[in-house]
Image: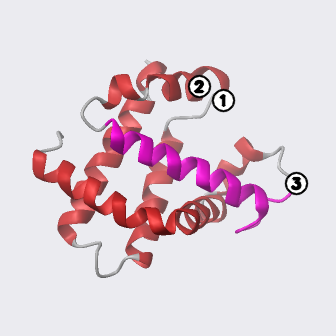
Amino acid sequence: MTLSAKDKAAVKGFMAKMKSRSEEIGTETLSRMLVVYPQTKSYFAHWKDLSPGSGPVKEHGIIFINGVYEAAEKIDDLKNGLLTLSELHAFMLRVDPVNFKIFIHCMLVVLSMLFPEDFTPQVHLAVDKFLAQVALALSEKYR
């Protein structure tokens, strides 16, 4: 599943639209993940408040969404571009790679809610393919 030039253009164009609502996207995505997939809370057990929209959830949601933007900037070489993040998640944070797919699913739901006009089937497909490639790149050091 490679990204065509058309896919890359759609991703970059949509990411530009997302930037005006970054905090909302990140917060809602992480909040949704923690509620719908409660097993993911184990990675954030050190937080005092895991409720949707809480301070820690909001702060980390922004970190997550900024990571997605960073990946979009490195869209032509995700494997090497996200190597440091892959090492961090594999060796220091020890995040099970299945959680990348969970986060992606939650993010796609949030994007479709927040951008009903802009998140067309073509954009959805391109963003989904891109995020799948991001998950694969982040999983690189697990092999």
Characterize the local packing of mark 2: few (<14), some (14-19) or many (20 or more) Cα atoms within 10 angstroms: some
Characterize the local packing of mark 3: few (<14), some (14-19) or many (20 or more) Cα atoms within 10 angstroms: few
Name the amino acid type tagged 3. Answer: Lys
Q: Secondary structure at mark 3?
A: loop
Quadrant showing the C terminus: top left
Start-end of magenta stretch: 49-74
Secondary structure mainly formed by the magenta segment: helix
Locate residue 61 relative to residue 122 in the image: left or right.
right
Q: Are marks 2 and 1 in contact (CB under 8 Å)?
A: yes
Locate residue 59 relative to residue 20 in the image: left or right.
right
Distance CA(mark 3)–CA(mark 2) = 23 Å
Earlier along the polypeptide chain: callout 2 or callout 1?
A: 2
Distance CA(mark 3)–CA(mark 1) = 19 Å
What residue is drawn where x is 66% and y is 29%?
A: 93
Name the amino acid type tagged 2. Answer: Leu
Name the amino acid type tagged 1. Answer: Leu
> Can you identify the residue that label 2 sits on?
88
68 lies above or below 116: above
| Disc number for residue 48 | 3
